[in-house]
């Protein structure tokens, strides 16, 4: 187990390094990015304070250094918790984002939870009642769920809420709690607002998960040990619980690897549409104004979120399945 | 599922004489036609059994055909403005006027500005039915930049308007824009998939055939690309496209970006297949005869799983269409005057506007239809190709 863990951690560090290089390249991509524009702007103003500020910025980002050293400056900054400087807000990134990252984390966590809680019973039902009316109905709804892009679903919900109730369902908390310190009331208010985006983001993931669980369970149920168990007279519920369900659960956890990037992607665009106080809308606005350091921090954060989530799922899988512990290599 | 044996059954014995050859014949008697059919033919027959997939294929075929003749189908041009009809609601097509059947017609819209709410109110003038014209000469267009024409399938009535899906904030016909938008939205998936498959097959082919250092490097890169959430990365890359670029260049740039993040999954699939196949005897034989690696990969190895690649392409295309729609919807993708469904939906981003003018959401429908059709088609193809069925 320990050697598996070490191997897995090394892979993760490699991946994160690769991601950080990619993100840095993206930060550097726009030719007229905010930093150069900003410096040009300060220079044009010709104030004396400006000279100091430019010097400070040059040092901060190592603008006079070759590219690979600039990268090192940026990465060491990241590791020390220095997320860079947002030129749009004229503040350090860490001050701009507030608890957006925390709320993103909470939102994604609840979405994963939602997908599991909903897809498990439905998937089991669909597999044990194959080709029944319920199975067909659920498959049909599932297909619609898979085909409806989540940002369109969010748009439809916003529209319906506006037309039917005349209210906006955007946001993640009641207005009086915005920018207030955390309290029980605020947490409850967040939970109250959370379910709509969770459902919107989770729908396609749930639909996909139900299909996979159904297929896996059907495969297992056709195996001979199930026939044996039935022949020996084991009650249907026990036959199901004893082995097939456990076997079918395995990919359930392994799939986090493909599920998590999908959820994080979904949460970004849904947050932008529903104007949730998460990283989504701010990532969007920072990209639109080419405030690349802010955007880079968000990108890095989302990637780290995904990679760490995958690590957790791989460890869980290794705990569940000895073959993975022993065989080495990743889960998929 | 097994039926539970509840009542005790009698022991059943068939009275007929047992004829071993008859059961053999009944069990597996492939017709001569089936035996002589090529692999493609068999796959096609099996595909035809999948009713939903066939319907999807027809729908997609029609949609892609419409892309060729958008100018003829759309009653208005892409940029034609009707300044007197800003945010006009969809005009309903009627058949019966005052109890008399007079064929498809529309009522003209009377415009009034509510001075208190400043809301634009349109009321149909039910006294003046205007018949819709078919196979007619209407607005002039430049057909694919080849020649000028003015022939349309449907034209607005003489001195009237025909806004089947309403108009947008500049008074442009939504239906016509939707038809033109299909041209961009549908092709971006095809071009993106072609690019991504070209990269994926070459990279995956080299990695799988030769293995070694190149393979490990490719493995690392695909791992990195697969563990970043796609959409934020797409957003970042398309935001990095210079603002000064020509919209057509942006179109190209977006397809390249879509392909750049998609090839790893194809490279992975190709690589793992080649890993197993390169040990086959016929590969060794080809090598002995002096075939170059590129020839072995292309002529001997790839045909083994072309059908699988095609099936997975039909599932990749809709995800690319969706990605483009999402990017343009957020305002980071294509830019006007290039018009895709996502660009059209961009106007629906403002929820207040949508509440007043719900027809702005119309481009959602074709997006969902196309995505559904492609996923049914992909399922059907996959089932047809799978020999274990």
Image: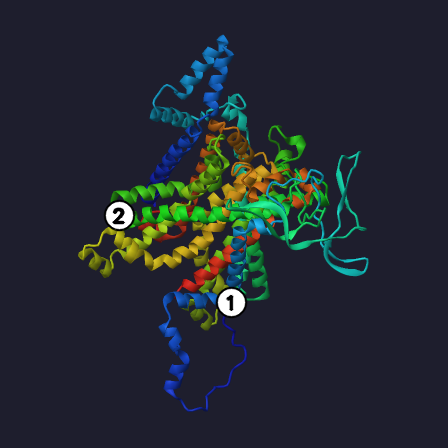
Residue A15 spot, x, y in % from top left: 37, 38
Residue ranking furthest to the top? A48
Q: Chain of mark 2?
A: B
Give the residue number, with chain letter if any, for mark 2: B211
Q: Is residue A31 visible?
A: yes
Q: Residue tagged by mark 1?
A: A236
Q: From the top left corner, tell me how far across and down residue B150 is, in percent.
A: 60, 48
Dot 2, crowdedness within 10 Å: few (<14), some or many (≥20)?
some
Scheme by which the image is coloured: rainbow
**Relative image position of residue A130 (x, y in whole percent):** 53, 65
Asked which secondary structure carries label 1, the reply is: helix
Instruction: Kindly indicate the quadrant of the structure image that contains residue B36.
Output: bottom left
Q: Confirm whether residue A146 shows in the render.
A: no
Tag 1 subunit:
A
**B39 or B154: nearer the viewer:** B154
Query: CA gap, disc 2 to disc 1?
Result: 49 Å
Q: Which label belongs to residue A202?
A: none
Q: Residue at x 69, y 42 (%)?
A: B357
Q: Is residue A90 left or right of residue A332?
A: right
Using the image as rendered, state which of residue A72 and residue B339 is in the foreground.
B339
């Amino acid at each position: 187990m320990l050697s598996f863990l070490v191997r897995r951690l090394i892979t993760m560090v490699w991946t994160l390094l690769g991601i950080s290089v990619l993100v840095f390249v993206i930060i550097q991509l726009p030719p007229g990015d905010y930093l150069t524009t900003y410096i040009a702007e300060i220079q044009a103003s010709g104030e004396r304070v400006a000279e100091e500020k430019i010097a400070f910025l040059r040092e901060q980002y190592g603008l006079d250094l070759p590219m690979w050293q600039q990268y090192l400056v940026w990465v060491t900054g990241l590791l020390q918790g220095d997320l860079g400087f947002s030129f749009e807000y004229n503040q350090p990134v860490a001050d701009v984002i507030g608890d957006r990252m925390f709320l993103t984390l909470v939102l994604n966590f609840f979405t994963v939870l939602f997908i599991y809680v909903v897809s498990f019973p439905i998937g089991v039902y669909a597999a044990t009642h194959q080709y029944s009316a319920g199975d067909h109905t659920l498959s049909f709804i599932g297909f619609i769920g898979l085909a409806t892009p989540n940002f369109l679903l969010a748009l439809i919900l916003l529209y319906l809420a506006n037309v039917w109730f005349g209210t906006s369902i955007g946001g993640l908390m009641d207005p009086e709690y915005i920018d207030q310190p955390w309290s029980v009331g605020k947490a409850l208010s967040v939970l109250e607002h959370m379910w709509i985006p969770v459902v919107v983001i989770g729908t396609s993931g749930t639909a996909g998960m139900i299909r996979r669980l159904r297929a896996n369970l059907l495969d297992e149920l056709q195996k001979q040990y199930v026939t044996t168990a039935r022949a020996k007279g084991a009650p249907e519920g026990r036959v199901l619980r004893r082995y097939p369900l456990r076997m079918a659960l395995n990919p359930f956890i392994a799939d986090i690897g493909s599920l998590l990037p999908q959820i994080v992607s979904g949460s970004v665009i849904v947050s932008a549409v529903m104007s949730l106080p998460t990283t989504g809308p701010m990532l969007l606005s920072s990209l639109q104004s080419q405030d690349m350091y802010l955007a880079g921090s968000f990108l890095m954060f989302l990637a780290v979120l995904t990679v760490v989530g995958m690590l957790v799922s791989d460890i869980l899988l290794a705990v569940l399945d000895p073959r993975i512990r022993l065989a080495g290599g990743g889960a998929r | 599922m097994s039926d539970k044996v509840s009542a005790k059954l009698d022991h059943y014995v068939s009275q007929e004489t047992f004829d071993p050859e008859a059961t053999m014949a009944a069990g597996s008697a492939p017709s001569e036609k089936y035996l002589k059919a090529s692999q493609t033919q068999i796959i096609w027959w099996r595909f035809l059994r999948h009713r939903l997939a066939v319907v999807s294929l027809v729908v997609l075929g029609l949609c892609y055909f419409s892309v060729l003749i958008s100018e003829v189908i759309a009653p208005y041009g892409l940029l034609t403005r009707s300044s007197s009809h800003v945010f006009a609601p969809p005009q309903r097509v009627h058949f019966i006027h005052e109890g008399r059947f007079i064929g498809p017609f529309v009522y003209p819209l009377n415009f009034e500005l509510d001075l208190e709410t400043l809301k634009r109110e349109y009321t149909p003038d039910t006294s003046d039915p205007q018949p819709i014209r078919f196979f007619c000469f209407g607005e002039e267009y430049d057909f694919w930049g080849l020649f000028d024409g003015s022939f349309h399938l449907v034209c607005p009535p003489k001195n009237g308007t025909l806004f089947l899906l309403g108009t947008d904030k500049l008074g442009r016909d939504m239906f016509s824009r939707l038809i033109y938008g299909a041209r961009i939205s549908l092709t971006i998936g095809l071009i993106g998939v072609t690019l991504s498959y070209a990269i994926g097959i070459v990279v995956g082919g080299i990695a799988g055939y030769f293995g070694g250092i190149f393979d490990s490097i490719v493995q690392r890169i695909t791992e990195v690309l697969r563990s970043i959430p796609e959409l934020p990365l797409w957003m970042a890359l398309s935001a990095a496209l210079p603002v000064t670029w020509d919209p057509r260049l942006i179109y190209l740039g977006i397809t390249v970006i879509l392909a750049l993040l998609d090839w790893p999954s194809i490279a992975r699939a190709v690589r793992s297949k080649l890993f197993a196949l390169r040990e086959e005897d016929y590969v060794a034989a080809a090598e002995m005869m002096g075939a170059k690696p590129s020839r072995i990969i292309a002529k001997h190895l790839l045909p083994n799983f072309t059908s699988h690649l095609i099936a997975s392409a039909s599932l990749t295309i809709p995800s690319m269409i969706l990605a483009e729609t999402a990017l343009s919807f957020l305002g980071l993708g294509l830019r006007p005057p290039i018009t895709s469904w996502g660009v059209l939906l961009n106007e629906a981003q403002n929820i207040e506007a949508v509440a007043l003018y719900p027809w702005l959401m119309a481009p959602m429908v074709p997006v969902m239809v196309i995505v559904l059709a492609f996923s049914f088609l992909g399922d059907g193809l996959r089932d047809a190709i799978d020999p274990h069925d």
